[in-house]
Amino acid sequence: MFTLPQKDFSAPTTCLGPACMQDLGSSHGDDLEGECSRKLDQKLPELPGVGDSAMFSPDTSYLSSRGRMIKWFWDSAEEGYRTYHMDEYDENKNPSLSQSDMQRVEPSLLQYADWRGHLFLREEVAKFLSFYCKSPAPLRPENVVVLNGGASLFSALATVLCEAGEAFLIPTPYYGAITQHVCLYGNVRLACVYLDSEVTGLDTRPFQLTVEKLEMALREAHSEGVKVKGLILINPQNPLGDIYSPEELQEYLVFAKRHKLHVIVDEVYMLSVFEESVGYCSVLSLESSVLPLFPRCALCRLPDPQRTHVMWATSKDFGMSGLRFGTLYTENQDVATAVASLCRYHGLSGLVQYQMAQLLRDRDWINQVYLPENHARLKAAHTYVSEELRALGIPFLSRGAGFFIWVDLRKYLPKATFEEEMLLWRRFLDNKVLLSFGKAFECKEPGWFRFVFSDQAHRLCLGMQRVRQVLAGKSQVAEDPPPSQSQEPSDQCR
Ligand SMILES: Cc1ncc(COP(=O)(O)O)c(C=O)c1O
């Protein structure tokens, strides 16, 4: 297939596992060559299978030592891959390895590719995000890494940005699975910025995030000896359905820059803003008019572009959570490279990459068919559930984005405890309604629940019937009808 460069790598080496046993001269094109091309006479590793992390890429201050080590694995093999992809072998079109214009797409989709993702896909993603995020300058494919979903991206970013035990600030309530995403591989923690429903001081809405609250949470984390490396913002927010204004985003980013914190901006619901009056602003759209202190140019339009990392995925906006597609946009090449290195384990198959590119480039269908229809359906479903809740006299929060309503069921708890919240959740579950309880989002006030409304009308109708029954204390657990009947909506819900 191709021969790896016989370069004199200065980084320490360890070949990983059985790959080392392979004959370097007889490459099998199986992606293990990179590991085995390292010099074998270098410094002995500190950890089993891994070199002395202090010696990896000492020129970058953006990555944790683990991130530098992960990036080093990439760097050590990259030259060979880059050379190979620039002049890829093709039996008919490039038999002598002298042409670079390989036309046939299909066979290459079955081969190892750039772990950042095929260039054709990263170009589409850059165009797609430039258009939908309304970036002031075209976004660049080299800043794009594609991988298998938002969860993997959280995991990868946490691993390459933080040392084990370090933390990200995150405002609560937040999409609770992030706790696992950053912890399971990276052993990274979350330092909560606890927000509450009471509107006090200069707040204009419940659960409002302010710089004062961020500063306080940061101080608290420091006083507990926790090193904070970054801030996670979800916009549109899950579970609140909130949207940050450009001015708020600016304030948060300036706060982060002041403390040299990375900011991961999770925009996986950016195309699910179904209320037209809600002006959504992607962090990638910020420009100098919003950030007067920062001149307008591709690289410096954000307060700290090297520490601002944006994620998007198709799981929500295209309802394709099973396809597993997510993307990172970052101008920080160290971070992009370190994440790409982890794409060996999180990368997308060539076939999915091809399909994704086809989808993302079909702008006419997305704009004229898909998004209007999707927004109309989300709005109808949202209107229905909101009206039901209003009729029940139940307070809720929702600003016209995302798939959920944040519902205040505190008055249904006999005592304001998380045990009572759990008991109420279980009563819903026993009556075949699956809601999410506030504790799962680290909400500090017991009694909040997340209702997902992105479902078909008759199912929502049936769900709301059951919610009413539970709240009226008429639990159906004992006298539940047989499954065939219990699954059927009543006439009202057809
Ligand atoms: C805010 C947010 N970010 C990320 C994810 C994870 O997305 P994925 O399915 O692409 O891993 C979710 C999924 O619910 C989410 O709500």
Image (tube, grey):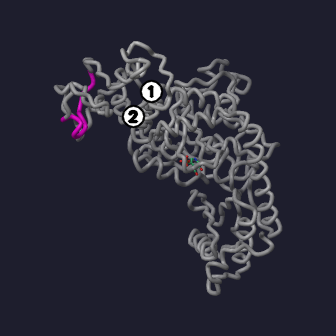
Residue at horizontal 72 percent and vertical 70 percent from the top: 462
Q: Residue furthest left?
A: 41
Position of 186 relative to 76 (above/below): below
Residue at horizontal 34 percent and vertical 28 percent from the top: 72
Rendering coords of residue 36 (x, y %): 24, 30
Q: Image check: 119 left or right of 398?
A: left
Label 1 to label 2: alpha-carbon separation: 9 Å
Which quarter of the figure is the N terminus placed in?
top left
The image quadrant of residue 295 is top right
Position of 276 relative to 446 (above/below): above
The region drawn magenta spans: 10-21
Residue 32 seen: yes
Magenta stretch encompasses residue 421: no
Residue at mark 2: 67
Q: Image check: 5 left or right of 273?
A: left
Residue at horizontal 66 percent and vertical 63 percent from the top: 448
Rendering coords of residue 337 (x, y %): 44, 29
Residue 63 seen: no
The image quadrant of residue 89 is top left
Q: Is mark 2 within 8 Å of ligand 1?
A: no
Which secondary structure, mark 1?
A: helix
The one nearer the camera, 291 or 22, is 22
The image quadrant of residue 99 is top left
> Which kind of residue does numbered mark 1 sit on?
Asp
